[in-house]
Image (spheres, rainbow, N blue to C red):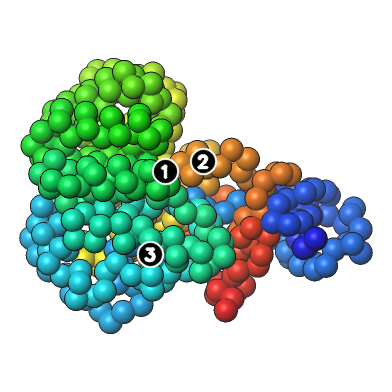
Amino acid sequence: MTSLLLADVRPWGGDPVDLAIADGVITEITETGRRASADQQQVIDGRGLLALPGFVNAHAHVDKSWWGQPWVSYGGEPTTQGRIAHERAERGKYGIPSVAGATAVLREFLRHGTTATRTHVDVDLGVGLDGIANVREAADALGGAVEVEIVAFPQDGVLRRPGVLELLDKAAAEGATSIGGLDPASIDRDPVGQLDALFEIAARREVGIDIHLHDRGDLGAFQYELIIERTQQAGLGGKVNVSHGFALGELAPARRAEMVDQLGEAGISWTTVAPINSAPLPWQEMRTAGVAIGLGTDGIRDLWSPYGDGDLLQVARQFARLHGLRADEDLTYAIELATTYGAPFVHRENYGLTPGARADVVLLDAENVPDVLVRAPRRELVIAGGQVVVRDGELRA
């Protein structure tokens, strides 16, 4: 039995405790100094640092990055269609997708304390399912330190690219947790057709759906209505997610409130990267209606944008600033979005700093949780699955 005692840590900034860990799982939590450590193979002094559970990145693209390569200058047209075309034309030059690229991104996630992620992986006529195979190999190379769920993602469209539906179906049959969609109206120009096809696969293969939806205003809202209707018809409540969904924050208050209630009733969740130029989400209404919200980094140093460093704490802080959060309770909520509330997006039923949960622990030098959010201090120690993977902010070899 592999075991360790993580002594003198403050879960969520509370009183000091000792965490006993065995075979990758938290087995016991006791008041600091009350538990004998003689039976532990390793004892780590937590030095009274604040402890959080591992972060959950609910929206990533780990297959796309040029992280670790020489700088790549931004190019192409700054529209969704323009970015797709540019990426398709240039990705081969930079070896995208690759095992090395996905590994580099997952290592950055880990260094910043992320121990689970839902990642969209491109599935198209050019790469087939190679990107999925690369991401799985990268996750295996890290020994499962970052648990990875895969969304088979049709970045270049669905119906407009004959053969993509068959690839999505095959990916679902071979273990992808969800299949994706992309702007059914503005990209495929057939929202009913795209959504009907995706929901048919999801229902038959018993997988989830995670749809990128950038369309704004009434066009976006119309597609939410179609998604709600199909989710209820297919009985897929709890298995459908909208990524980005910028239009929701743009709707008039009465229509927005009605839409949020319908999303909650249908069991549809939402993931956001809280971009600074977007309308704030009605997060309080969503919380009341039971619409789960997850945070993600989106792409990191890829052919869409040079920004991103894999630190979900930075995204949580951006969410807080976008939505004007200042009270301690609300600042803490932003951290909960990056941790506790992210767990369902990777199907973690037992998650957190609690006995029986996988031992994913992040230690930070901070006074309290709001202090963590505002300063985003380095991760002093990261334990993933019971193994120490980061010390003093740096990955162990």
* Corner quadrant of residue 291: top left
Residue 56: image location, x then y, percent: 49, 50
Residues packed near mark 1 inside 10 Å, few (<14), some (14 to 19) or many (20 plus): many
The secondary element bearing badge 3 is classed as helix
Residue 395: image location, x then y, percent: 55, 74
Q: Which residue is mark 1?
A: 177
Residue 347, numbered circle? 2
Q: Are marks 2 and 1 in contact (CB under 8 Å)?
A: yes
For the C terminus, give its image quadrant.
bottom right
Using the image as rendered, state which of residue 35 and residue 21 is in the foreground: 21
Inspect the image, locate mark 1, and give the three-letter code of the amino acid beneath it.
Thr
Per the model, the C-alpha gap separating discs 2 and 1 is 10 Å
Inspect the image, locate mark 3, and give the three-letter code of the amino acid beneath it.
Asn
Q: Left or right? Give the position of 124 relative to 35.
A: left
Q: Which residue is mark 3?
A: 134
Per the model, the C-alpha gap separating discs 1 and 3 is 16 Å
Q: Earlier in the sequence, mark 2 or mark 1?
A: 1
